[in-house]
Image (cartoon, rainbow, N blue to C red):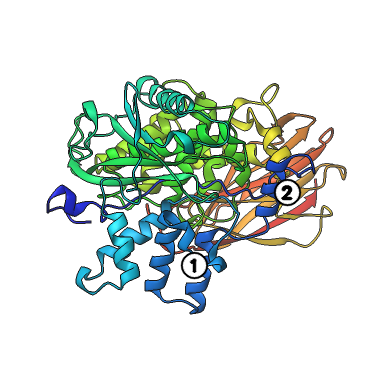
Amino acid sequence: MPRTGTPRARRGVVAALACLAMLAALAPAASADDPVASNVAAARLSPTTPQLIDAALASGRITAAQATVYRGWALMRPDALPAAFVSPTPWDGTLAMLEVTRALARMDPARLSPALADVAARVDTACPGSSGNLPNTKSTNHFFIKYRTSSIGGGLTIGQYAAALESTWKTEISTFGWARPPKDPGAGVPGGRYLVRLDNLSSSLYGYVAGTTYARNNPATGWNDRDSVASCMVLNQNFSGFPSGPTDSLRATVAHEFNHSLQFGYGALTGFGKVKNVFVEGGASWMEDEVFDGADDNYFYLWPNFRTPMAQFDPKFPYPYWVVFRALTERYGTGVKNGGENVMQFFWEQVSKEASTNLAAMGKALKHEGTSLGIAYHDAAIALRFNVSCGTTPKKWCLQEGPAYVAAGGANSNMASVATIGDPAYAGKVANDYALDWIGLPAGQGAFDLTLDVTSGGGKLRTSIVCRTADTLSLLAPTEVAKGSTDATFTSVDPTGCDTVVAVITNENQTKSSPKTITNTNYSVTTLPA
């Protein structure tokens, strides 16, 4: 993104990073009399529109230029998109808009095809991608909303849109204390309010936030951001058919999208840091629960692949990782100032201050709370394996909505198991940079000794033997860390009374703050009768 030029010239080349990707994978079973659930169940079977375009590009069926056109049309002209790329699966416009703006910034404006020129013209507007006439307006304390009265669908009203936006501002800025987004001097809205447009988007697209002009230094922060960007928000004018129903889908989307507005305001998406998509989108998905805890729209993309390292989690579909951030932060409190939100706020401030990014920033955020990323991630791995509600289990290992997660996405299961104590050693591998393994152990074969040995890869494997009895979790021995020539050894482990026993193994070997490749650590688990 350029640092020079007039604000209007920069419109459309500022990265448009936002939007809620509410893919309905693993949604609850549909019933014949529940049209929303039936819609979700059908959508689960097909890739999203951006995924269809990516697949066609990867196979050589379309060119890179055609892919840019189709992504642009999916965002701005859904009626023009070829049928082969139309999908009922809910999706967000974040990565698609980002790819479109980046691709256009690399092209010679004088040599664009008519289709590309059309996309470029629609992006190069006051609010990228949304330029049609919206004759009605509503001003709130902090937002200026443009819309068509007759086009708001799903039984919603402009008052509900306004209320969701103001509730989000109140929580994320007034209560939590995140820095407000900078004003856009070129938006032409009264009082410097934040521009929101309700537009006729695809029936499966939630909306997006797009960067508009450089503010350079956000006056709401106490430091020089240098890359702070003003932005606007585009929301679907009709939330009918989305997984959680119109009201909860609207609320979750607004909480998610406005968090992107704040990320832009910190300069964290456009300058220093090259923040991974998992923190951008997984973090915004995590914020949905902090603002509207009952919306639960993010349930529809449980679960992530826990064997993928944190910073390298799927850049094309990073939203499921929200539940890991929830498990990392919930112990500090939810929906309250200086609770779990403080971890994520500290993370974005680190990037904004150009102090650290990605894994290093998350590590500093958790250190600020008195722990380390390695310990917090290990505790989260225990919590996510069992998903027990908070009661008799220590707070660091329980999840308030854990049973509801299981009801929505199914129970998490072990990656492997030791069938009989004394069997040949189990050989496994777990990726460096915060990934995990869950290994089932026998609960009814008496006491045993267990040794975990790092055989190659230089990992640092934090290991706990966890007993579940009803909804209570406990350790059968103190946690050990295996690294180098030091094994994790557990002697005379007695599983008597346990319903389930699991060896929880997390690899906290951090190769880099922003690793580009996935590397693995190999290990072996040996069990013997005590």
Pointer 1 local density, CA inside 10 Å: few below 14, some 14–19, many at least 20: some
Which residue shows up at 12% across the image and 53% down it?
4
- Hey, which residue is sitting farthest bottom in the picture? 60
Question: 494 and 103: which one is in front?
Answer: 103
Which residue shows up at 34% across the image and 38% down it?
261
Left or right of 377: which side holds 382?
A: right
Left or right of 477: which side holds 456?
A: left
Q: Report the quarter where the N terminus lies.
A: bottom left
Mark 1 lies on a secondary structure that is helix
Mark before the other along the chain sequence, 2 or 1? 1
Pointer 2 local density, CA inside 10 Å: few below 14, some 14–19, many at least 20: few
How far apart in space, not on screen, are marks 2 and 1 (Cα)?
A: 31 Å
Three-letter residue code for mark 2 = Ser
* Image position, residue 478 (x, y; %): 64, 36
Q: Which residue is mark 1?
A: 54
Q: Please name which of the two marks, 2 or 1, marks the residue nearer to the observer.
A: 1
Q: Which residue is mark 2?
A: 413
Three-letter residue code for mark 1 = Asp
Mark 2 lies on a secondary structure that is loop
* Image position, residue 102 (x, y; %): 31, 61
* Image position, residue 413 (x, y; %): 73, 48
Position above or below: 223 against 48: above
